[in-house]
Structures are given as structure tokens and as C-alpha cells.
Image (cartoon, coloured by chain):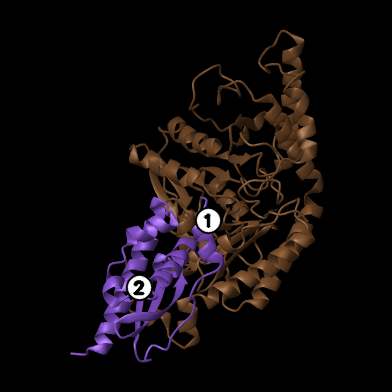
Chain colours: A brown, B purple
Amino acid sequence: MKLPIFLDNHSTTPVDPRVLDAMLPYFTEKFGNAASRNHAFGWAAEEAVETARKQIAKLIKADPKEIVFTSGATESDNLALKGVIEMYKEKGRHIVTSSTEHRAVLDTAKSLEAKGLADVTILPVDKYGMVKPDDVRSAITDKTVLISIMLANNEIGTINPVKEIGKIAKERGVLFHCDATQGVGKIPVDVQAMGIDLMSFSAHKVYGPKGIGALYVRKKNPRVRIAAQMDGGGHERGMRSGTLAVPLIVGFGKACEICEQEMPAEAARLAKMRDRLQADIMAALEESYLNGHPTDRLPGNLNISFAYVEGESLLMGMKDIALSSGSACTSATLEPSYVLRALGVGTELAHSSIRFGVGRFNSDEEIDYTIKKVIEIVTKLREMSPLYEMAKEGVDLKNVQWAAH
Amino acid sequence: MAYSDKVVDHFNNPRNMGSFKKDEEGVGTGMVGAPECGDVMKLQIKVQNDTIVDAKFKTFGCGSAIASSSLATEWLKGKTLEEAQKIKNTDIVQELNLPPVKIHCSVLAEDAIKAALADYQKKADPK
């Protein structure tokens, strides 16, 4: 086993060697511009892009023509929200979204609102981080043009009832955008069955390269139109100008093809590793709390709060394991995770949270090592924690008058 | 963010981690911070003849908070009460090479020292 261990597969994933092999020729021999229509270099590039488009479309049950390449999911989210609001401004300007969305959606919506271009309703989530379809239904007005609800959350892995939301969107004639960055390639996605009109996702979360993503834009029933947010050569059916990043697109396609073929086996394997991680850690450590939905959750996701210890110190104590925390100390804002806060997790437990992200290249041996290390460091830091000491003495921490700072 | 070697050393080998009994004679206890803010420090001193003969800490917080309080106990030992009053958060920042985002950890440590000294004074001289 090699250290450090990468157990932060929600943040990014390594490029699968099979993906890299597929990409390499497109940097050197096959370097053409896919928009060059009159020579062999251009044709080879165009053919490779179209193959990738098919591979990607197949994974999400879309038509290849419905795939618009972008630089990543953040751009896709921006393009979806800004593009729809601009295009449908005659119809309305109301967006319905939720409190646990990625900031690429939330901040885009807020920015549209700040500029006076949109009105935004941000729906709460339940204690598992799930959006209630009924809330979506009652938030829709005659001015609503877009619902933007994520498929699976990046921190807690909770999977939203997207199919129900898609149905409501259809009934009310509102477009439905879904940020599926964490879900695509991990769980089955079917844009038809789920009633999704626009969907953001990216390659680097599915063992493809960084810097490439896609926005699915429905072509019929209804035909969705978006206003381009970048002017230029009119690539991607006029929705996203810019020379296509052929090697990255080839990699994205190959990565999706692998996910499509291996998903059932891979999901089962990751869930098994994750379940063991969860069961062994939580059995050994009292007052450890699962964040997110116990079952409707991404297979590789595990988010636990360890009462009385702070997240960043936990990470520091496990330097040879790459993980992430909802603690304020790990963020630039000094605020603990807004996602956990939206679930109603107390600030102190949000500070104490650790996110584990099990991925394709993790081994059982790494899981064993992680279980051992987590138990060790939580125990050590609890010994060091005045809060743990007080709790053991029977002090109710909620009744303590803290000297705030 | 990379931690300085000194922060890592204090984190891995905390000095004087533990507790005295609060009601023990000569013990002053300072508890500062709040769980919602992500850091709570408990700093204790044991005083004989106006000199701090021993110090202990327990901290809930990030690595820099733990290191700041560990360092504080190290510095407190052997100091007179008057000398202890003069420990400044900036001294801690400098010694541990704390980045700007972690300065509040040193402030908390200074507050904990002041609170422990005040608690000792109050117990020694109840008016």
C-alpha cells in the first residue's frame, strides 16, 4: 500500500489509465481543429469529438446532439441559469433552487438576482439534505422559468428525488436544470425518465481529465433554447463558442464509456467499502453522527461528525490520508459548511465533520488503514478536548456560558 | 495550507496536555472560546509563591489552536505572575509562524492565559 491515500474522490478523481491512452494521440499526431472542415486533420478531430459525444450521451440516455461541451460543471451551471434567464425573459424570471446546491448554482442565481435579472426562491432541505418535491410544486409561480435542483450532493452524497421534480416541472411547463456533477457515472442517470431539460456534469469527477464538462440541452419535448454567454465562432450549435478541446473531449468520452460499462459492479464495490468504513468507525467511536441520507446516498460517500473534536485537527492528524472537512478552518470564509447547516446540523458538529470519498482506485487495505487511523486520532483528540472532558463529567455543553470571541 | 514545523511538532507532541483539579489550591483555570466558533481552550496554571510551577491545557480546535495553547503552557512554566501577564499573542504568532488566517488562535491563547491568571487571583484574594 502506498501513502498518502486518496480518499477525497468527490473533489476530483485521477485519470483512468485507459482514458489517458485514448487521449494521447490527440495531443500530437491528431491535433486538428474539429471545426476545420476541409482537411484530414480536421476530419480526424471531428470524428473523435463525435465518437465522444455518443459515448457521453449514451451514459445519460440522451441524443449526442444534445451534448454541449464546456470547460466544466461550473461553466455548465452558469450557462444553464444565465442562458435560460436571458432567453426566456419574456416568459418570466423566477428560479427555484435549493439551499444545498453547489455554489456554481447558488452564486449564479444570487448574481442574477443582484443584477435585477431574476427572482430566486431557495428551498430548504430535510434533515437528510433532501429537497421535497411538494416544496418545489408550491414554489412555482406563473413567472417561474427554471427549476435547478442537484442530483446528488457533493458533501453528504444525498440523492434528490429528481424524477418526481422532473415530473412536476413537466406538469407546470417549467424547465428543469439538474447539476448532476456528483451523480453522473456513479448512479444511473436517464434524462428522459428523470424529465431533465438541462444537466451539468464534468469529466474529472468520473476519472477523466480536468477542464472539460458538458451541458445537456434537451432538443425536443420541449426544445430548450439558451442564450450563449460567450461570443465567437458559434461552436456547439451556437450555444458555446470556442475551439473544442479535442484531447479532453476524447478523454471525457472514454471515461463515460468506462462508467457506463462498469457502473453496476463498481457501485456495489464502492458501497461495500464505504459501508465497512462507516460501520467500523461508528461502532468504535461513540457520538459519531452520520450526515446525509442513510440509504439514498452516493455509493462512495460517507460524511461523519465526531463530537468534541474539530475537523481540521482531525485532518492534520491523518496527514497520510487525503480527506475533506466541513470545518470552518478548512474554508476561506471561516464559516462551517453551509450544506451541513442547511440540514440543521449544529455549528459545533459541522466543525467536527469529515467527508470520505471512496473511488475506483481505493483498495480494501486502504480502507482498513483509514479505519484504524480515524479511530486513533479521534480518540487522541478527544483526550485533548476540554469539551469531551466536560461531557464526561456530565456537563451539558448547551448550558455553558461560553466566552465568545 | 502548509503548517510550520513548530505547529506540527506541538500538534503531534503536545506539551502539558491534561487537567488539574479546578478546586485544587493554587490552581487558576481559564476557559475561552465557544464550540460554535470551532475552538475552545482550557488553560490551567499551578502557582506557588507568585510563580507558575506547572501548567496544563486542553483544546478543542484546529492544529494551530492546539499548538498555540501547548506553547503557552511551555512558556508559562517558571514565570512569575507578572511575567505571565506580559505574554502577547504576537509572540505566539512569531514563534509558531502562524499565517494571518490563524492569528485568532494566538489571540485565544493570550485570552486563556489572562483568564487563568484572573481566576487564580480571584481564588487567592476573594473580595
Give the answer, above or below, for where A311 lies relative to B81: above
Q: As rendered, which of A98 and A300 lies closer to the eye?
A: A300
The reply to whether residue A272 is visible in this rendering is: yes
Residue A281's disc is none
Q: Which residue is rendered at x = 49% and y = 62% of the image? A: B63
Q: As rendered, which of B127 and A76 lies closer to the eye?
A: B127
On the image, the x and y values in percent for residue A8 come to 64, 53
Q: Residues within 10 Å of mark 1 (few under 14, many from 20)?
A: few
Q: Quadrant of residue A130?
A: bottom right
Q: As rendered, which of A402 and A358 lies closer to the eye?
A: A402
Residue B32's disc is 2
Residue extending farthest to the top is A38
Callout 1 amino acid: Asp
Chain letter of disc 2 in the image: B
On the image, the x and y values in percent for residue B104 come to 36, 60
Residue B5's disc is 1
Callout 2 amino acid: Val
Q: Which residue is rendered at x = 55% and y = 43% of the image? A: A177
The reply to whether residue A404 is visible in this rendering is: no
The C terminus of chain A appears in which quarter of the rendering?
Answer: bottom left
Q: Secondary structure at mark 1?
A: helix
Mark earlier in primary sequence (1, 2)? 1
The N terminus of chain A appears in which quarter of the rendering?
Answer: bottom right
Q: CA distance from mark 1 to mark 2?
A: 26 Å
Q: Secondary structure at mark 2?
A: strand
Q: As rendered, which of A46 and A148 lies closer to the eye?
A: A46
Chain letter of disc 1 in the image: B
Q: Quadrant of residue B42?
A: bottom left
On the image, the x and y values in percent for residue A73 come to 57, 39
Residue extending farthest to the left is B127
